[in-house]
Amino acid sequence: MSAETSRIRRIWRNPFAQTVAIGLAGMALVALASLYASRTAGRQEAVTDVRILTEIVATAVVEPNLTPELMQGSTDSIAQLDAVIRARVLTGSTTRVKLWTEDGRIVYSDVPALIGERYEFDADKQSSLATGEVISEVSDLQGPENRFETMYGEMLEVYLPIDGPNGERLLYESYFDVSAVSESSDRIFDALAPIVIGSLALLEAIHLLLAWGLNRRLARAQRERERLLRLALDSSNEERRRIAADLHDGVVQELAGTSYAISAAAQSAHASSLHTSPAHTSSPHVQSPASQTATADLDMAAIAVRRSLQSLRSLLVDIYPQSLSGRSIDVALTELLAPVETAGIDTELELEGLPPLSQETSGLVYRVAQEGIRNAMKHGEPTRIAVSVRQDGQQLLTSVTDDGDGFDPSAEVPPDHFGLRLLHDAAAGQGGRLSVESEAGTGTTLTVEVPV
């Protein structure tokens, strides 16, 4: 793992960095959705404006200038209406005007060649005539009645029914340049976009300020938690040192003295029985059965005391191990695995490319190995235990692997099992993390990862 990757991982694990990243991602999504909605709303508003304009022009400009002569095809009436439409309608974005009868005949168009021609209405035109609704759509310009509009490209077509001079219903149709409609939509969007972006930016700024304040409080709480944890660990180490000193200077010394005294008593009893043999005994150097039993009991007592003393000294090493450093961690781990080998279990110790370790890190490595070995011996019935300590980029990985019974890591840890919880807190206090991989019948791997 490269140093840059490790740095990125550490940054990403920071709650404030996660809050900022999630907040910015959320703001970006909301901004995109809002801008899309603003663009859609702007286009709809522009189309609505065109429809309103068309309705006003049709009822206020075109409808009053319709005459019965126009309906009969009078050239003068057509010319008169054409002059009005060119002066008051065909301005700006309006590019074409048509006026239809209900049977599909064009009674007026600003293209004279279309006047008098008859075409079949599509469904939208029929619906507009039947319902009186203003309808707009993007024209495909494929029909023969649109052959003079193909030069304009894409166009917006708006039509609505109006009243003719004799009360008949006519269909007024006008065409608009889509680019002009888009320009109107863009103006609306340009007015809405700063409001949307500004509001979201202000909201995100408030969110970041709140997150920053919360992160500071969390950081203070974390520092206080780490301080209390260090105090607890220091107090634990001090208490272990005191207990170890009391045991060593008290019980261990007394047991050692007792062991020597019992051994001396056994030797004295053996020598005394040889000089005080009964007179009827054929050999003065043969012990009586009672003396033999007493001497054997004393020897067994001496052996039991020495074994107890050895176990107590091993316990002292567990309670208060030797001073650890980057150079002595291998010695400490070797001594930790020695009783495991004595119990007939295969062991393996792997130390790969270790940098100089601080006293705190060395202590954590030792506690990880100690807890992993203790759990394996107590619960797993393994035939092999392997301890590995290696550097991976900027991380120090300590793992204990056994081939014992294993367990379900998702199951809740018993309330009286504090070892893993203490390791978790100790690792977190050094900026690391604890992980346990296990499965019933396949063994367990306990791993702690901390920054070097």
Image (cartoon, helix red, strand yellow):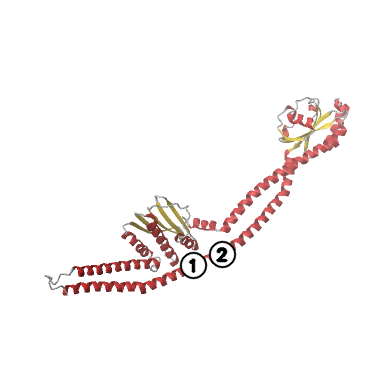
Residue 77 in percent (x, y) is at: 87, 29
- Determine whether the residue tagged by mark 2 lies in a helix, strand or loop: helix
Q: Amino acid at mark 1?
A: Arg
Residue 327 in percent (x, y) is at: 38, 66
Image quadrant assignment for residue 124: top right
Residue 374, placed above or below residue 50: below
Residue 116, placed above or below residue 18: above
Disc 1 packing (10 Å; few <14; some 14–19; many ≥20): some
Disc 2 packing (10 Å; few <14; some 14–19; many ≥20): few
In the rendered image, is residue 324 in sight? Answer: no
Q: Amino acid at mark 2?
A: Ala
Closest to the observer: 82 or 248?
A: 248
Direction from residue 10 to residue 214 in the image, left or right: right
Direction from residue 224 to residue 27 in the image, left or right: right
Q: How many marks?
A: 2
List the residue tagged with mark 1: 230
Residue 262 in percent (x, y) is at: 27, 72
List the residue tagged with mark 2: 221
Which residue: 35% across, 72% down?
251
